[in-house]
């Protein structure tokens, strides 16, 4: 499985992929027939024959819907089809497939939903640019109100393919079938929660088209970064695996301890917590494998971290919002070593973020949640666009946390993480993530890959723990999470099912 298999295409990039395929000799009708066939196949695999209402829009999504209706009707499924607009207004491939439908074409009307049919939503695709209104919105809202089983074609109508934002309304789908590659909106919330299970169908677009498109957005999956992960040498030792430093805070000491333990679990050969004399005994009473260095003042911290053997630094967890934290951040960045800045190390620059950005000279990962992000960046737009802009502005890799974590690099490369369970929303979880990134940086993993790998393994560990998760459990589950990489690399690069309301028949 190659990184290209994890590519996500924007709406415009998908239009280009279609165009390149047709320029290469694949007729548009063939692509549309393959798309409709994939949808019909997915329906037949998940449902027994039952009444179906196919809702078609005026574009190519509607054309896909005509193919689905024709194929299901040919196998005896009771199908009624409604069209937004006049049949004679359909052009191109959509018009050709409308002509192949030999049964009635009804205007869109709530009566199409009578009796609670299975609904195929082929109204609008990923490029919808304005909020749904009129009869289309009425039907979408009725689908949700009646909790009808609904199948999305490309995206649930009303979900924007680039941002995942809902334009007015969108149906909650049992599953969504998209084509060739998924789009960012399939993974970003709230769109992801409406797609249900995401099926990415091969419709005959040559994989080589990606070489011309050169996508820069990816599903965060092992195929993207696994080749960058360290493999301990048979003749190696702990010094070959890096020596990470965590700057410990004076009050919330648990945060730094969680981060240090996570860095060790992810493979850093040595980890030191730098602690003030007043709290040294607290840190020293922790796990015996973590080194605790007594740091009396700023000079002592600088001397410790300047040692060339200590090659990756983390500050922020439990650090405190203070002038001391701010000064320490700037000093550590001045050492030009790979660095992770989390939590308070970000908040202390809310009044002067440019000072922070100007100090970043070496590989650096910022790990804000939405509140911390807002304190540093004024960027607007969807989550992917905001993270990209922030990375370009700061010169750092930005990991914008959440259920749909986005990792963005200054060069524009970005990954969307989709495997995080909701149980990760617990105190200390972010400290563990910061420590995991630190441990990978200490082992020489490039900053973007370290952040992406840590985010995925963090989610995988959370899924392995299950209910009752606390932050400490993530650390204990890391060896098993890492062990799953051997099989995860062979799975498809798109997220698994998100179930809605009712189980599929």
Image (tube, grey):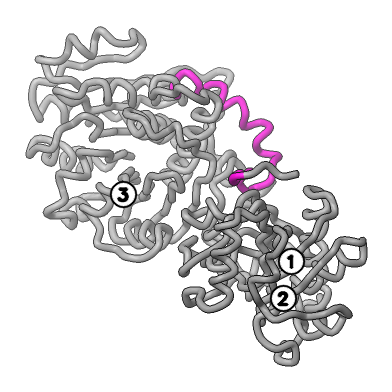
Residue at left offset 53%, top offset 68%: 158
**x, y (%) of residue 371?**
26, 48
Q: In terms of secondary structure, where does tag 2 sit?
A: strand
Cα separation between marks 1 and 3: 40 Å
Farthest residue toward the bottom?
A: 88
Residue at left offset 58%, top offset 46%: 224
Q: Is residue 497 left or right of residue 248?
A: right
Tell me the crowding category of disc 3: few under 14, some 14 to 19, or many 20 or more residues within 10 angstroms, Cα based. few
Residue at left offset 47%, top offset 64%: 166
Closest to the observer, 125 or 212? 125
Q: Is residue 133 above or below residue 241?
A: below
Q: Is residue 467 left or right of residue 333?
A: right
Q: Is residue 285 above or below residue 120?
A: above
Q: Is residue 383 above or below residue 71?
A: above
Q: Residue 22 lies in what quarter of the image?
A: bottom right
**Nearest to N terminus: mark 3 or mark 2:** 2
Cα separation between marks 3 and 2: 42 Å
Closest to the observer, 232 or 90? 90
Cα separation between marks 1 and 2: 7 Å
**Nearest to N terminus: mark 1 or mark 3:** 1
Confirm or deny contact between disc 1 and disc 2 (CB under 8 A): yes
**x, y (%) of residue 395?**
31, 55
Closest to the observer, 98 or 331? 98
Label 3 belongs to which residue?
A: 370
Residue 302 visible in image:
yes
Q: In terms of secondary structure, where does tag 3 sit?
A: helix
- Of badges 1 and 3, the one in the foreground is 1
* Residue 320 covered by magenta stretch: no
Residue 240 visible in image:
no
Identify the magenta region: 474-501
Label 1 belongs to which residue?
A: 53
**Nearest to N terminus: mark 1 or mark 2:** 1
């Amino acid at each position: 499985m190659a990184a290209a298999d994890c590519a996500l295409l924007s709406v415009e990039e998908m239009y280009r992929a279609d165009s390149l395929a047709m320029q290469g000799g694949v007729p548009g009708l063939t692509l549309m027939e393959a798309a409709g066939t994939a949808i019909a196949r997915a329906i037949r695999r998940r449902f027994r024959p039952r009444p179906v209402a196919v809702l078609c829009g005026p574009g190519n999504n509607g054309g896909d819907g005509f193919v689905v209706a024709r194929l299901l009707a040919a196998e005896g499924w009771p199908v009624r089809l409604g069209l937004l607009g006049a049949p004679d207004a359909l052009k191109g491939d959509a018009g050709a497939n409308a002509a192949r439908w030999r049964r009635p074409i009804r205007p869109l009307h709530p009566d199409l939903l009578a009796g609670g049919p299975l609904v195929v939503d082929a109204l609008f695709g990923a490029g919808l640019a304005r909020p749904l209104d009129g009869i289309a919105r009425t039907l979408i809202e009725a689908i949700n109100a009646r909790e009808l089983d609904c199948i999305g074609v490309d995206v649930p109508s009303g979900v924007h393919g680039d941002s995942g934002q809902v334009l007015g309304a969108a149906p909650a789908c049992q599953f969504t079938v998209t084509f060739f590659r998924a789009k960012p909106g399939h993974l970003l919330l709230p769109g992801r929660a409406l797609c249900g299970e995401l099926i990415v169908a091969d419709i005959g677009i040559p994989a080589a088209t990606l070489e011309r498109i050169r996508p820069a957005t990816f599903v965060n999956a092992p195929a993207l970064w696994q080749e960058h992960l360290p493999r301990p040498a048979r003749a190696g030792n702990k010094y070959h695996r890096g020596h990470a430093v965590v700057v410990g805070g004076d009050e919330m000491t648990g945060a730094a301890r969680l981060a240090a333990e996570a860095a060790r679990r992810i493979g850093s050969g040595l980890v030191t917590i730098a602690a003030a004399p007043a709290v040294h005994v607290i840190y020293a009473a922790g796990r015996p494998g973590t080194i605790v260095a007594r740091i009396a003042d700023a000079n002592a911290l600088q001397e410790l971290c300047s040692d060339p053997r200590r090659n990756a630094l983390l500050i922020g967890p439990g650090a405190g919002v203070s002038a001391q934290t701010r000064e320490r951040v700037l000093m550590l960045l001045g050492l030009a070593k790979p660095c992770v800045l989390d939590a308070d190390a970000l908040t202390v620059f809310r009044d002067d973020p440019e000072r922070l950005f100007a100090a970043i000279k070496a590989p650096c990962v910022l790990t804000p949640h939405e509140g911390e992000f807002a304190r540093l960046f004024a960027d607007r737009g969807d989550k992917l666009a905001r993270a990209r802009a922030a990375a370009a502005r700061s010169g750092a890799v930005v990991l914008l946390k959440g259920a749909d974590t986005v990792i963005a690099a200054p060069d524009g490369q970005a990954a969307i993480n989709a495997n995080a369970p909701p149980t990760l929303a617990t105190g200390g979880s972010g400290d563990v993530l910061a420590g995991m990134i630190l441990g990978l940086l200490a082992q020489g993993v490039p900053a973007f890959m370290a952040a992406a790998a840590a985010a995925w393994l963090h989610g995988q560990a959370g899924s392995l723990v299950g209910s009752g998760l606390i932050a400490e459990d993530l650390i204990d589950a890391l060896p098993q999470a890492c062990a799953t990489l051997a099989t995860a690399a062979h799975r498809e690069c798109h997220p698994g099912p998100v179930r809605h309301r009712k189980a599929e028949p």
